[in-house]
Amino acid sequence: MPPPAADPTAATRERVTRAAGDLGAAAVRQMEADHGWFRALSAEDRSWVGLVAQAGITSFVQWLGGEQERPAVTADVFGTAPRELTRSISLAQTLDLIRTVITVVERDISGLAAPGEGAHARDAVLRYSREVAFAAAEVYAEAAEARGAWDARLESLVVDAVIRGEADDAMHSRAAALGWGAVSAVAVVVGSTPAGPTGPVLDALHRTARRQRTPLLVAIHGPRIVCLGGDVEDAMALAGTLEPHLGEGPLVVGPPVPHLFAAGRAARAAISGHTAAAAWPGAPRPVRADDLVAERALVGDLPARNALEARIVRPLQEASGGSLLETAAAWLDGGLGVEGTARALIVHPNTIRYRLAGIARSTGYDLTDPHDAQTVRLALAFHRLGPAPRAPLRG
């Protein structure tokens, strides 16, 4: 039986080791020649890329002379560069660089290999390049996952700040980091949190918004999900698009606002509407927070109570010398219809019909519609109670 052969890569390893520096420099020169975007990088980033290329060649040499088990490419090669480099160079560009380095090494390896070992060395380059490609994908996957987790945290902080009305420089900075620096026409949609894991729900909402080319910020607040859409032309249409991914129950759309800094009042109105929507069993889905102004006032929403005064009571007081307010009160309190209300006010029934039309023109509420009539009734009730107390009443 013949004696075992010597390690066929020992001589090749020694030659490649001596030429490793030259291979790295040649790879960087080839990158500069082949890729214009590489030449556009900053000097620091080009330096890091060159260091990665040199580390890859060094790691290949060490692997070539060892047992050639699966190499620790991620740590040996990409661990030399900061993870922030993934923000400057995309995965596709990284693969271009890997392809260039492998091409240079494969081109020169035959001349560096010991006699009779050229084919073995080329095969080793191919096997190692596969590991490098997988390691690059792993690095970018980890970076994307980390960015996703950080973006989700930033997103939640921005939405929380909007709800609390903390429109300060910190919120502006965080919003800008999420690409919301110049977003306008903001709409707020609040729905119920569906049962089960929330991660897939958030992903589905963002995918849907991206298909609509709508910037979206989402945060989960216990039983409800708060969504802020940017550059929105039709807030109700946005709510309809997001509806399939939200849980059962009310879906409330806040009033439109011009920018993120003004979205606090819209978010609070939508959240209040989501809480109060149960008081209107026939509410449509989605429903505007402004259509729930009476229900919101019932749950202690002071802006909604003030809105009832401004939208309903005050216009009725100012129109026709207060006769519309008198007619609305008689119509709602008596429940007598046109003829009965006319007798109660000692006017002609046609006058009541004319005044009902005037009430609808002045306030936008039709007293012959059950929900509109309920809204006006509550507006009159709150008006009779007087200004709302600043603090809850104590028994």
Image (cartoon, helix red, strand yellow):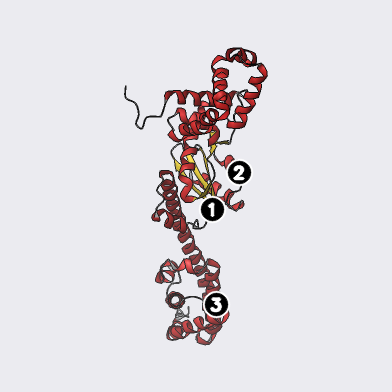
Q: Indicate the position of residue 375 as horizontal and vertical percent values.
A: 54, 26
Residue linked to disc 1: 184
Between discs 2 and 1, the one toward the N terminus: 1
Residue 352 lies in what quarter of the image? Answer: top right
Vertical arrangement, residue 154 with respect to residue 303, above or below: below
| Neighbours of disc 2 within 10 Å: few (<14), some (14-19), many (20+) | some
Residue name at image x 51 percent, y 64 percent:
137
**SS type, badge 3:** helix
Residue 245, can we see it?
yes
**SS type, badge 1:** strand
Q: Indicate the position of residue 209 as horizontal and vertical percent values.
A: 57, 49
Q: Indicate the position of residue 51 as horizontal and vertical percent values.
A: 43, 77
Amino acid at circle 3: Thr
Residue linked to disc 2: 241
Q: Indicate the position of residue 101 as horizontal and vertical percent values.
A: 52, 77
Name the foreground residue: 275 vs 102: 275
